Image (cartoon, helix red, strand yellow):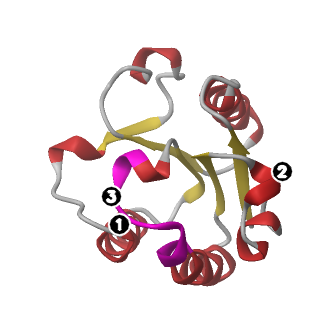
Amino acid sequence: MIKILMGEKGTGKTKKLIDMANRSVSQSSGDVVFIDKGTRYMYDLSHEIRFIDVSQFEIEDLYVFYGFICGIIAGNFDISQIYIDRIFNIVDDSMDSLKKFLIDIEKISQDFNIEFVMTISGDAALAPEYVKQYIA
């Protein structure tokens, strides 16, 4: 399952994502991963959440980021949720590239029973249909 929290900058998407991740730790039977660029929000998360700062890695686009996520899953088959904050801050890519990324993420979500929740800045009303279907 994929959920997208989409809204303009400053509307509380990251705070909501952090709250969701912290709640999921107590409700989940698996491991929880939070991916962000930088460590700004690291201390707002429960210590039980695996925090990954992608600025330590060279992730250029959504194709590379997908491979990165697959590597995380390959290293830990107990992951039940992956939270991704500000996906277009992590990668310098376009909304058009997001379509294939979401298709690929949906497949591994189903194959490995992992819930993905991510934030995207922008007007949800103007989002393409392939994004709108995931907006929570």
- At x 30%, y 31%, the residue is 38
For the residue pair 107 and 10, the one nearer the viewer reads as 10
Q: Are marks 2 and 1 in contact (CB under 8 Å)?
A: no
Q: Which numbered marker is on residue 65?
A: 1
Q: Which residue is mark 3?
A: 92
N-terminal label among 1 and 3: 1
Which residue type does callout 2 highlight? Ala
Quarter of the figure with residue 18: top right
Q: Crowding at label 3, few (<14), some or many (≥20) Cα neighbours within 10 Å?
A: few
Which residue type does callout 1 highlight? Phe
N-terminal label among 2 and 1: 1
The CA distance from mark 1 to mark 3 is 11 Å
* Magenta span: 89-98
For the residue pair 98 and 34, the one nearer the viewer reads as 98
- At x 22%, y 42%, the residue is 55
Quarter of the figure with residue 65: bottom left
Give the overall secondary structure of the magenta segment.
helix
Q: Are marks 2 and 3 in contact (CB under 8 Å)?
A: no
